[in-house]
Image (spheres, rainbow, N blue to C red):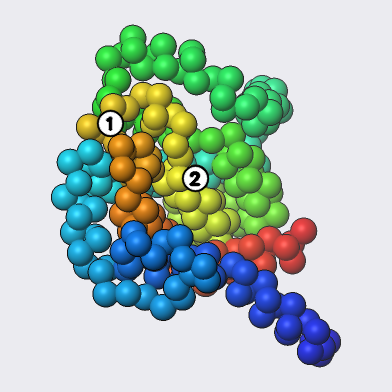
Amino acid sequence: MWNASPLTYLTLLVALFLSIFPIYWMIAMATRTNDVVADVPPPLLPGGNGGGNIERLFNNPDAFFAKGLLNSVIASGVVTITTVFFASLAGFAFAKLRFRGKNGLLLVIIATMMIPVQMGIIPLYMIMVELGWQNQLQAVIVPFLVTGFGVFMMRQYAEQAVPDELIEAARVDGCTTFGIYWRVVLPALRPAAGVLGLFTFMQTWNEFMWPLAVLNPDNPTVQLSINNLANAHFQDYTLMFAGTSVAVLPLLIVFIIFGRQIIGGIMEGAVKA
């Protein structure tokens, strides 16, 4: 076994400090008042105004923060679940099933990954107008129920993680194609599904441009709520820090709950590669 040198530990500690300190400072400033935000050197210890700042945050008439938080939870949760389900189902089909046009369809899916999201905003917005989904939550959910990246990722993982012999044995036992997916393939894809789920949740939670285009300020996601705070006539920095701190908490909770499985999936994929 290779023994790490002291320089390795020092490098890791420096990287850990650089990663954690901005989050810690943000949370610390969320408990302070505006008169110390611009102090040099900045205060490093938490203050005593955290509860008051959070109360002001949820009572702010311009941010609609509680509604934005709920909308983001719903949108991110639904998009994550559907992306993992449809991507794993399609990945299984492309990796293990035989059907006409499989390679052509896979090329189309890969091609969608090469198109910048910004290029599709105008036609997608026109579709939302035709459907009457402006300022409705389904407008930020339905267009992202599955992604080309997710399908390709699950296809690559299923190609290696699911032996053909296991699928044939399930067919001999009388299992249907969906039954094979649900009982055999999906458990084998769990590590990759965890990684895809985390990335999808983070991306949907942090999405800003598309909700800004299709939602109104009175029906925001959490990122739009924070933007409403930033666009106020008076820049209340502690309120913005408090809103950002609360918005980060769901991401931390998801990572803490699923972190071990996600890291295991990444390491397993690295070993397979």
Which residue is identified by label 1?
A: 217
Q: Nearer the viewer, residue 38 or 86?
A: 38
Q: Position of residue 217 (x, y in %)?
A: 28, 31
Q: Mark 1 or mark 2, which has the lower sequence index?
A: 2
Split into 4 quadrants, where in the image is the N terminus? bottom right
**Tag 2: amino acid:** Gln
Q: Position of residue 100 (x, y in %)?
A: 65, 23
Q: Position of residue 235 (x, y in %)?
A: 35, 46
Disc 1 on helix, strand or loop?
A: loop
Instruction: Residue 102: tell me if it is visible.
Output: no
Which residue is identified by label 2?
A: 203
Q: Of discs 1 and 2, which sits in the foreground?
A: 1
Residue name at image x 40 percent, y 13 percent: 127
Specify whether 93 is left or right of 179.
right
Above or below for 75 versus 143? below
Q: Nearer the viewer, residue 33 or 56?
A: 33
